[in-house]
Amino acid sequence: MPGGSLEPGESMEEVARRELFEETGLLAGNIALFNVFSDKELYYQYPHGDEVYNVVAAYICHEYKGNLIKNESEVRDLKFFNTHEIPKEINPPDKPIIDIYLKMFGEGGLGKHDGTKLVDVADSGEK
């Protein structure tokens, strides 16, 4: 999942848009704050020994423009996944975000993901 740190003067939404573009080449259209995460699962120890508990503002991108362009200095691989195909081996700080997303919008949740945007079950024609 794209992500990064705030730069001076940036809002959380601005950093979400910037990191999406830097890491994928995609320009975000509508985005929405999904949740703010801060818990023991977000503990990280840097190689030089500093310890931090990260606070993550996770956004959902409903609309985007462009094609995936892999920035070799930012990411190893780029790929979209259906909710049932998400790999087990993912970046540890991303796990709580994905877990809550799947509980809310995965199979049996409050909604579904149609591959490009979140769709409310009530709005999708399903009963």
Image (cartoon, rainbow, N blue to C red):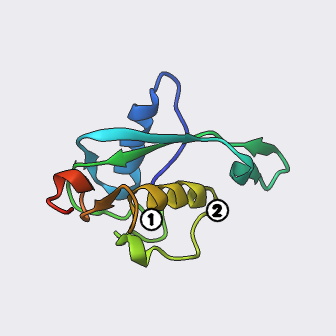
Q: Say which of marks 1 and 2 sits in front.
A: 2
Image vertical order of residue 73 relative to residue 78, above or below: above
| Dot 2 crowding, Cα within 10 Å, few <14, some 14–19, many 20+ | few
User: Which residue is the site of mark 1?
Assistant: 72
Instruction: Please give the name of the residue rendered at 52% of the width and 31% of the height, measured from the top-left corner.
Output: 7
Which amino acid type corresponds to the residue marked 2 in the rendered image?
A: Pro
Q: Is residue 12 left or right of residue 95?
A: left
Whether residue 76 appears in this view of the structure is: yes
Of marks 1 and 2, which one's residue comes earlier in the chain?
Answer: 1
**Residue 13 image point, x, y percent:** 40, 33
Assess whether mark 2 and mark 1 are in contact (beta carbons under 8 angstroms): no
Return the residue nearer the eye: 72 or 9.
9
Instruction: Please give the name of the residue rendered at 53% of the width and 54% of the height, measured from the top-left corner.
Output: 97
Which amino acid type corresponds to the residue marked 1 in the rendered image?
A: Glu
Return the residue nearer the eye: 72 or 119.
119
Callout 2: helix, strand or loop? helix
**Residue 98 image point, x, y percent:** 50, 60
User: Which residue is the site of mark 2?
Assistant: 92
Instruction: Please give the name of the residue rendered at 38% of the width and 58% of the height, measured from the top-left corner.
Output: 105
Question: In the rendered image, which quarter is residue 72 located in?
Answer: bottom left
Separation of residues labelled 1 and 2 (CA atoms)? 21 Å
Q: Is residue 99 left or right of residue 77?
A: right
